[in-house]
Amino acid sequence: MKVDFFIVGAAKSGTTSLYNYLFKHPEVCMSSIKEPNFFSNKLLNEQKMYYKDVKIDSIEKYHNLFDKHTNNKICGEASVSYLFYEKIAKQIKKYNKNAKIIIMLRNPIERAFSHYLMDLRLGFVNESFDSIIYRNSKNKNQCLHYQQYIKVGNYSSQVLKYLDSFGKDNILIINYDDFVKSPSLEFKKTCKFLQISKQFNLDFDKKYNVGKLAKNKTIAYLYSVYHLRRVVNLFFSDKLKLYLKRSLFHENTNMSMSLKTRQYLYDYYLNDIKKLNLITSNKFAKWIR
């Protein structure tokens, strides 16, 4: 078998929702793990990334993530690490030269802060967003958090790697703002791109991977334990999981980015956004104010 399409990122740009929508499509077989990170496994290990996902480090493990009785289904996966790392596009091309690539992009300023809030919720970071940015901006030994929040948002070169490897006809680029505004329309475009039926009813009001913060430090610590989260996801009912989320977490309503930091990041990303618009026919022109 060969995996037919890849949702390659960016992180915090709607990939979890799209993965779940496609998971329910009768003509699609998505990987049982949302982010296998198969092609980036070695790089993630070398960087000692703090995410404690199950390691998919062999082609056998990788293909076992897909239902063996796929019949006429197409297979896909969604690993957001694939967009950032330099050689992943060529590796995927070598694996399947006819693969289709889906790239979801969010305003890099909003994406950076959303990523920070997620890591804060998971217990991966305990310092302020501003501290991470300003402490690492001129530091040659930048921390992994700075890479994850800031450098990941330099999209133009990342997108260009995939365009060079697969050509524009085999790449679908989705603007996160459009996806949030009209998920049904963007999903239909995705179905057309993948050449699967668009006549498929979904509950687009259901939200996935919504940012929440623990109500106290004990809950935050327990939630940071990967294997504990796995047990909850595997053995707790959806109703019980929803109850726990509502009881133990609250929305990120009280946290916002300072105007100074927002302006700093705007200036940092401006040239890259202009380059991105050149290669995507101004698909992200609204990011420039």
Image (cartoon, rainbow, N blue to C red):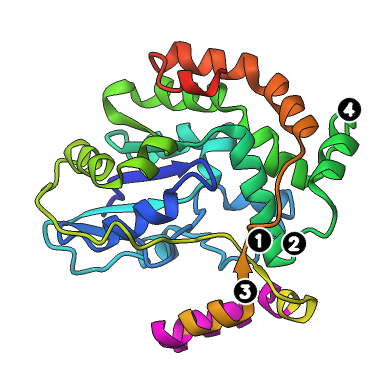
Q: CA distance from mark 3 to mark 1?
A: 21 Å
Mark 3 highlights which residue? 249
Q: Earlier in the sequence, mark 2 or mark 1?
A: 1
Instruction: Say whether disc 2 or disc 3 marks the residue closer to the N-terminus.
Output: 2
Check if mark 2's residue and mark 1's residue have beta carbons within 8 Å.
yes
Which residue matches tag 2?
124
Say which of 140 and 3 sits in front. 140
Dot 4 corresponds to which residue? 138
Q: Is residue 223 magenta?
A: yes
Image point 63% across, 57% down: which residue?
253
Say which of marks 2 and 1 sits in front. Answer: 2
How many residues crowd around disc 1 within 10 Å: few (fewer than 14), some, or many (20 or more)?
few
Quarter of the image that includes the C terminus: top right
Specify whether 285 is left or right of 69: right
Question: From mark 2 to mark 3, how far is it between C-alphas?
Answer: 17 Å
Q: Amino acid at mark 1?
A: Tyr
Q: Residue at 46%, 83% (x, y): give it.
A: 234
What secondary structure is the magenta-colored segment mainly? helix
Magenta residue span: 222-240
Q: Which residue is mark 1?
A: 51
